[in-house]
Amino acid sequence: MNSSTPGSASQRQRIFIDKQSPKAYHALVQTSEAVRAAAADAGLDRTLVELVNLRVSQINGCAYCLDVHTRAALRAGETTRRLGVLAAWRDTELFTPTERAALTLAEATTAPSDTAAQDAACTAAGDVLTDDQISAVIWVAVTINAFNRVSIMSKHPVRADR
């Protein structure tokens, strides 16, 4: 079966859409690089960006992105303790007000149908984040949501270290 021949749903394996459409994927990577720069310019450190990437990936159930961004967070200096409780961050005292605002915004961005949560997240974020920081956090969440969809639909594998 070649790339232009449709297969039956029961036989067809997932294609890696990043490899199948490299120009589109490259554009997403470029967007991510611009977002990372905007976050740094807004004064957001790399650990906060990785917390947002991880929390969104947890919500979306993207094993591949969780693997990638856990390692990135550890390289950036994040602790295993905080990573271990990230899914229940509201029930801890381990996250700063800035991180809490960013995580709230990330969750609201990931569940766009909940406009009340969006309004509350934006209002609360405005108490601790600048407009540039709010924009950067939302852009981080938007881009990791896109990468989650790429990896989930492509079934990118998480392989054991060799």
Image (tube, helix red, strand yellow):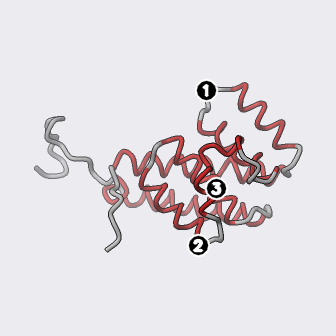
Please tell me how many numbered marks the rendered image carries: 3
Earlier along the polypeptide chain: callout 2 or callout 3? Answer: 3
Report the amino acid beneath label 1. Ser
- For residue 79, above or below residue 115: below
Name the residue tied to disc 1.
Answer: 113
Crowding near pointer 2: few (<14 within 10 Å), some, many (20+)? few
The foreground one among 67 and 82 is: 82
Separation of residues labelled 2 and 1 (CA atoms): 34 Å
Q: Secondary structure at mark 3?
A: helix
Q: Residue 148, how many percent across, how many down?
A: 47, 48
Residue that appears at 81% across and 43% down: 125
CA–CA distance in space, label 2 to label 3? 13 Å
Residue at 67% over, 63% down: 47
Residue at numbered disc 3: 51
Inter-mark Cα distance, 3 to 1:
22 Å
Q: Which mark is residue 99?
A: none
Taking depth in this image into account, of 93 and 59 the one nearest to the observer is: 93
Q: Residue furthest right?
A: 127
Q: Residues within 10 Å of mark 1 (few under 14, many from 20)?
A: few
Element type where label 2 sits in the image? helix
Which of discs 2 and 1 lies nearer the camera? The answer is: 2
Percent x, y for residue 23? 41, 60
Residue 75: numbered disc: 2
- Give the mark, 3 or 1, whose residue is nearer the N terminus: 3
Image quadrant holding the C terminus, namely: bottom left
Q: Tell me the residue at 52%/48% (across/down).
A: 57
